[in-house]
């Protein structure tokens, strides 16, 4: 029997795609399914971005590009980060990636090995832990607690650092909770990290443009004292409804940049050429469509929180970013994954059980409000009917 020689049995999965597949199967069988499981905007990519890709194809942009990305796109990314965050980033520190996960893969691969420890948020994006375990490193969860609005505690995080710690992963705004860590905690973290100069930081800021209630995103790129060890992960997928374009970017310390370039050359060669021209149009072009999406997400956010808090034995703190609600269902009598499964099979509502996002996810389920307001309210109504019958 064929067996891979590496540690493939340790690789985890992203259950949102398994739930999506099951939801699609049920829908194909004629069931009325409302999918609040997948983190994907239900908007079209804005027309001017699509047109930029078409124009690039018509202009003959069909060939390989540099592994690091085309210069104009890297310049646009650096200019945008410097303008929005007061950063000091050179285009030569920017790497264009085929989506956001590649940055996680590369960063965790660089610093993960047997004997090393990597800190990651929990509840958090499941690929963090999956990749850490794949490298043989020890995953160390940093709890995100409901009483803190699912923001990390700098003191708690700093207290988890040991001589074996090689990398810290932070994510704000957060998937799956929608939590936003306030500037005061980030300031405290940055100050505390001065005592650990050999620890790298990967900041997942893919939802950086998605904050509510007047909150400003606090990017770690705005702290010059982190520049020589900060890896930034971001991209276009969420802000511009470009999930299927597979276009992301990262910023790397100069001493790591050529290593990342070599990883790109050895794996995917380069990012889709036409998509890169679309990325330029997204950053440099009109922002009205992206802003309009945020207005609609805010309307849905308020509606879903109000509706969830009206369900029996359910409570939900108000998320401050991204497009997820993370209601507490611990008083319903259900384990989270069991409830999520039954909601899909019996009520036709796709959600994700909290444990799919980590050990601290039990007692919660994730709902994506990247769906129409009508569907969201209908889905929560179905959830209420199910809980009333099975409470």
Image: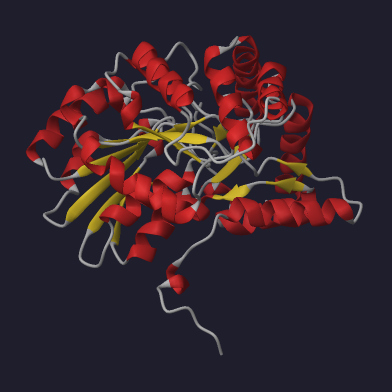
Residue extending farthest right: 30
Q: Position of residue 190 (x, y in %)?
A: 19, 30
Question: Would you say 346 lies left or right of 14 here?
Answer: right
Q: Where is residue 284 in the image (x, y as percent from the top left)?
A: 53, 13
Q: Is residue 211 above or below residue 264?
A: above
Q: Residue at x 61, y 50 (%)?
A: 16
Q: Which residue is drawn at 21% across and 60% down?
A: 116
Question: Would you say 19 lies left or right of 254 here?
Answer: right
Question: Would you say 44 lies left or right of 268 here?
Answer: right
Residue 187 appears in the picture as rendered: yes
Q: Looking at the picture, tell me which residue is in the foreground, 97 or 244.
A: 97
Q: Position of residue 339 (x, y in %)?
A: 64, 54
Q: Position of residue 46 (x, y in %)?
A: 69, 20
Colouring used for the render: secondary structure
Q: Where is residue 148, by image quadrant?
A: top left
Number of numbered discs on residues: 0
Residue extending farthest bottom: 1
């Amino acid at each position: 029997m064929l067996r891979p020689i590496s540690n493939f049995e340790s690789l985890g999965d992203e259950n949102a795609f398994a739930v999506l597949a099951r939801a699609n199967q049920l829908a194909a069988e004629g069931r009325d399914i409302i999918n609040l499981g997948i983190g994907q905007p239900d908007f079209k990519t804005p027309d001017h971005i699509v047109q930029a890709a078409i124009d690039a194809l018509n202009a003959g942009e069909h060939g390989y590009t540099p592994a690091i990305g085309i210069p104009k796109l890297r310049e646009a990314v650096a200019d945008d980060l410097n303008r929005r965050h007061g950063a000091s980033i050179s285009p030569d520190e920017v790497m264009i990636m085929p989506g956001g996960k590649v940055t996680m893969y590369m960063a965790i691969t660089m610093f993960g090995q047997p004997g090393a420890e990597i800190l990651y948020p929990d509840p958090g994006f499941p690929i963090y832990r999956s990749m850490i375990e794949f490298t043989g490193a020890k995953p160390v969860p940093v709890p995100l607690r409901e009483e803190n609005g699912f923001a990390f505690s700098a003191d708690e995080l700093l207290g988890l650092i040991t001589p074996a710690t090689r990398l810290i992963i932070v994510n704000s705004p957060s998937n799956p909770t929608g939590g936003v860590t306030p500037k005061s905690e980030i300031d405290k973290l940055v100050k505390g990290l001065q005592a650990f100069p050999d620890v790298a930081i990967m900041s997942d800021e893919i939802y950086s443009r998605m904050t509510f209630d007047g909150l400003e995103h606090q990017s770690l790129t705005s702290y010059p004292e982190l520049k020589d060890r900060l890896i930034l992960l971001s991209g276009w997928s969420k802000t511009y409804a470009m999930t299927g374009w597979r276009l992301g970017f990262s910023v790397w310390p100069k001493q790591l940049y050529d290593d990342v370039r070599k990883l790109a050359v050895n794996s995917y060669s380069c990012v889709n050429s036409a998509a890169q021209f679309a990325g330029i149009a997204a950053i440099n072009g009109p922002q009205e469509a992206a802003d309009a999406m945020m207005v609609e997400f805010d309307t849905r956010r308020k509606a879903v929180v109000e509706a969830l808090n009206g369900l029996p034995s359910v409570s939900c703190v108000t998320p401050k970013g991204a497009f997820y609600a993370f209601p507490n269902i611990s008083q319903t009598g259900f384990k989270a994954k069991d409830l999520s499964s039954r909601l899909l099979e019996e009520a036709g509502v796709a959600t994700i059980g909290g444990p799919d996002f980590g050990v601290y996810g039990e007692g919660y389920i994730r709902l994506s409000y990247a769906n129409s307001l009508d569907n969201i309210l209908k889905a929560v109504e179905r959830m209420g009917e199910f809980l009333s019958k099975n409470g």
